[in-house]
Amino acid sequence: MLEFAILGLLHEAPMHGYVLRKRLHETLGMFRTFSYGSLYPTLRRLQRAGWIVEEDAESADTESRTWGRRARRVYKLTAEGKERFADLLADAGPQTWDDEGFGVHLAFFSRTPADVRMRILEGRRRRVEERREGLRAALSRAEERIDRYTRELHRLGLESSEREVRWLNELIAHEQAEQRDSD
Amino acid sequence: MLEFAILGLLHEAPMHGYVLRKRLHETLGMFRTFSYGSLYPTLRRLQRAGWIVEEDAESADTESRTWGRRARRVYKLTAEGKERFADLLADAGPQTWDDEGFGVHLAFFSRTPADVRMRILEGRRRRVEERREGLRAALSRAEERIDRYTRELHRLGLESSEREVRWLNELIAHEQAEQRDSD
DNA sequence: GCTCAGTATATCGGCGCGATACATCGTGCG
DNA sequence: CGCACGATGTATCGCGCCGATATACTGAGC
């Protein structure tokens, strides 16, 4: 997931770890964060894989650089990196239904193909509906022996699943409307 | 977290990995699951730490055992394991405010001391309120440049934070009422 | 001159996951 | 009767990510 997000953000501009993490915070905003303990090793991994390369000291152009310190490692996408991101964007597999995968992918939704968007949205809906049904079942079977606090948690979870399904239905309807328009 | 849940469940009865995982599913129900890839190594770890021990082949009593196959490793709590669980129950630290930690701890809330329950609930509320404020800020500053889908996600997140804060307030009020009663 | 917050990179141990492997048992179906 | 299948049962491997920790330089305020 981090890989996906990094590749997506580097499309905007070359960046070094520190600002990358800030952009990560902003665009994934309040819903998912990544620690430096994941970021730096992942950057290494992407570099080794050839998806990104380190920009060298040049690039004295735009940036005013009032500093003399080096140390910042600025990375930029390679052609292979762009391909890789396109592949990940087009993936509508199971990991894009779960909380984490869905949330991150959604942050790059305007760049993902319309049909893929649809499949992700529907997959997510199926996932949340399953959760909702599971919670409904647990609650109906619960009245007796189940712990009061657990029951409360289930109630909250059920409500939130229901709300998310409604939210997904709206998004899906909107997508369909858009698709109709473009016909 | 897995450690906590295992120790808590083994209070009911000695169990082997497979049924432990089922009980895990039931009591954490729909909101958190653990894979065998975590469970078995964790069981080892707890054994090494001395919190649990493997019951030996005896125990030919209650269980009818229509099978001749061995292989099942039945674990039971040690005195140190019970102490360990009590310590974890009494912990109201930061990890008990986050989604995962909070959810798991809640499953054992009826066994946690009332004052600890209160501190966890309040800590969680603070956490969710921060998230809520973050999302509100993001949404108000958003209208312009932010991606439509991200905004939708923020909307959903905001609603769900608001809902959870209300839910927490109810729980907290209930706790306070209970505390008044016992005075 | 000092301290403090922000900028910047990096590593370490540990937790949990998904994939995979392997073996046994009971049930149902042809 | 045989055999496939689903449930029972334990285990390992590599990997992604986290929190803690270390290090060091810069700019602002006092």
Image (cartoon, coloured by chain):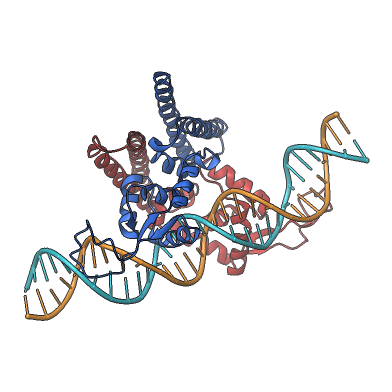
Chain colours: A red, B blue, C cyan, D orange
Asked whether, in this view, residue B59 is left or right of residue A18, the answer is: left
Q: Residue at x 29, y 47 (%)?
A: A130
Is residue A51 at least partly visible in the picture?
yes
Q: Nearer the viewer, residue B24 or D17?
A: B24
Residue B119 image point, x, y percent: 51, 31
Q: Nearer the viewer, residue B90 or A125?
A: B90
Q: Residue at x 33, y 47 (%)?
A: B12
Q: Residue at x 43, y 41 (%)?
A: B105
Task: Note whether B118 is above or below D23 in the view shown.
Answer: above
Q: Nearer the viewer, residue A8 or B83?
A: B83
Residue A24 image point, x, y percent: 58, 47
Is residue A103 at least partly visible in the picture?
no
Task: Note whether B67 is above or below B176 in the view shown.
Answer: below
- State which quadrant residue A181 falls in: top left
- State which quadrant residue B178 falls in: top left
**So how many labels did they put on this image?**
0
Task: Note whether B75 is above or below A66 in the view shown.
Answer: below
Residue A42 image point, x, y percent: 59, 60
Residue A113 image point, x, y percent: 43, 54
Q: Nearer the viewer, residue A83 or C27?
A: C27
- State which quadrant residue B137 falls in: top right
Asked whether, in this view, residue A20 is left or right of residue C14, the answer is: right
Task: Note whether B7 is above or below A153 in the view shown.
Answer: below
